[in-house]
Amino acid sequence: MKKYYWGFALALIVSLLGASAASAHVTVQPAQAVQGAYEKFTVRVPSESKDSATVKVEVKFQTDSVSISRFEPKPGWSYEIVKDADGKATGVIWTAEGEGIGPTEFVEFYMQGKVADTATAITWKAYQTYADGSVVEWVGADGSDYPASVTKVAPKPAGAATDSHGHTTAPAGEGEGKPAAAAPAGGSQTPLYLSIAALVLGALSLVISLARGRASR
């Protein structure tokens, strides 16, 4: 039985640590947008390699779901816009001009664009290149080892229009006297890490208590 308890705890800890590692991938925020809206998208890139820095990041756009047109300059990085034969942006490549993103660091890149009026989701395929030449392709389905980031798109409210600044406005009379809805969370991983740490400590405490109980019999 003692081996069973230790085996159970070890399996639990490994699964929790695996969940933590899986969450540390290239993501694009916000996690949810609205059809027809102009958005500022944040590409968050953590460096996962313990021995090599991230020196290049490429993100490909799902052009039938979003049109990206603006990019914020990032100190220490240059960027190249990838375009198709019609001159439409289909992706962007950020390249480090210095050492890149170290093993314990992350960097955020910013871009702006318009969500398509018929979009239901935006899939962002990302390619992370390390200084040693290895490339991690974040292009898989949700739940895979290397998932692509996905922004879910909600339908535009009935009768809503888009103003000159690209903001989606509600029909006249709607929303008056009502508090503004809270913005979606920014995607901080801190609560997840704290929860994982608490579960790991709890599992260890359970195993130690069981082991002591058996030893005292």
Image: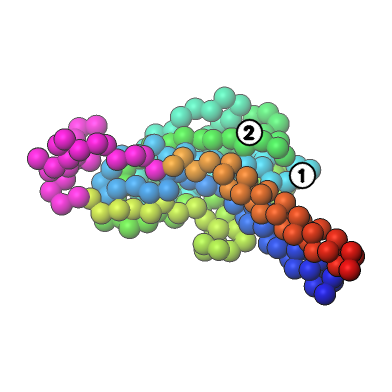
> Tag 1's secondary structure?
loop
Residue bounds of the magenta highlight: 157-184
In the displayed image of the protein, which residue is found farthest to the bottom? 1
Q: Quadrant of the N terminus?
A: bottom right
Q: Position of residue 11 (x, y in %)?
A: 74, 66
Q: Position of residue 141 (x, y in %)?
A: 52, 63
- Between 87 and 9, the one nearer to me in the picture: 9
- On residue 50, the disc is 1
What's the residue type where badge 1 is placed? Lys
Would residue 86 be visible to someone looking at this image?
no
Q: How many residues crowd mark 2 within 10 Å: few (<14), some (14–19), many (20+)?
A: some
Residue found 62% across the figure and 61% down from its top: 145
Residue found 85% across the figure and 61% down from its top: 212
Q: Position of residue 159 (x, y in %)?
A: 12, 48
Of circles 1 and 2, the one toward us is 1
Q: How many residues crowd mark 1 within 10 Å: few (<14), some (14–19), many (20+)?
A: few
- Main SS category, magenta section: loop
- Residue at mark 2: 96
Mark sitting earlier along the chain (1/2): 1
What's the residue type where badge 2 is placed? Ala
Q: Is residue 175 above or below residue 66?
A: above
Q: Position of residue 57 (x, y in %)?
A: 58, 43
Would residue 109 be visible to someone looking at this image?
yes
